[in-house]
Image (spheres, rainbow, N blue to C red):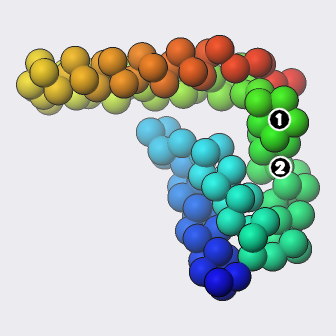
Amino acid sequence: MRLLWAVFGFTALALGGLGIALPLLPTVPFLLLATFCFARSSERLHNWLINHEKLGPPIRDWQENGAISRRAKVLATLSVLAVFCLSAAIGLRSELLMIQGATLCCVMVFLWTRPNGPR
């Protein structure tokens, strides 16, 4: 079972790494998932990720305070706007745009009601 958790952790870590380069793929949720998986598979990997110089701070901000940095909020908002604009530009049906818009608005409300992290 520990091996399966490690595989899930590395998969989540890889997706989080892709999210650093791809603006529409979220990074921190995948890092949080990787942390969760590594906690069940390897204390060494879990500690490495939490104490990582670049990847650790947003994880610790969330775990300690439920906080998201203002920079991350702004980048996420820009990504959400880009996705919605792209959906409208490609001619998605209005019903789908309304569902997508409502869902994205809920995501934004959740995101912007979290405390601002220090980083």
Left or right of 90, for residue 100: right
Q: Which residue is mark 2?
A: 56
Q: Residue at x 58, y 61 (%)?
A: 12
Q: Which residue is mark 1?
A: 61
Residue situated in front as seen by the camera: 6 or 89: 6
The amino acid beneath tag 2 is Gly
Q: Quadrant of the N terminus?
A: bottom right
Mark 2 Cα within 10 Å, few/some/many (few <14, many 20+)? some
Q: Position of residue 92 (x, y in %)?
A: 13, 28
Q: Position of residue 67 (x, y in %)?
A: 77, 27
105 is higher (above) or lower (below) than 10:
above
| SS state under label 2 | helix
Instruction: Evaluate whether residue 107 shows in this view.
Output: yes
Q: Quadrant of the C terminus?
A: top right
Which of marks 1 and 2 precedes in the sequence?
2
Q: Position of residue 11 (x, y in %)?
A: 56, 68
32 is higher (above) or lower (below) than 93:
below
The amino acid beneath tag 1 is Asp
| SS state under label 1 | helix
Extreme residue in the front direction: 1
Whether tag 2 and tag 1 are in contact, CB under 8 A, the answer is no
Q: Position of residue 20 (x, y in %)?
A: 60, 47
Q: Residue at x 31, y 19 (%)?
A: 101
Left or right of 100, for residue 4: right
Q: Residue at x 11, y 18 (%)?
A: 94
Residue situated in front as seen by the camera: 39 or 13: 39
Q: Residue at x 42, y 16 (%)?
A: 105
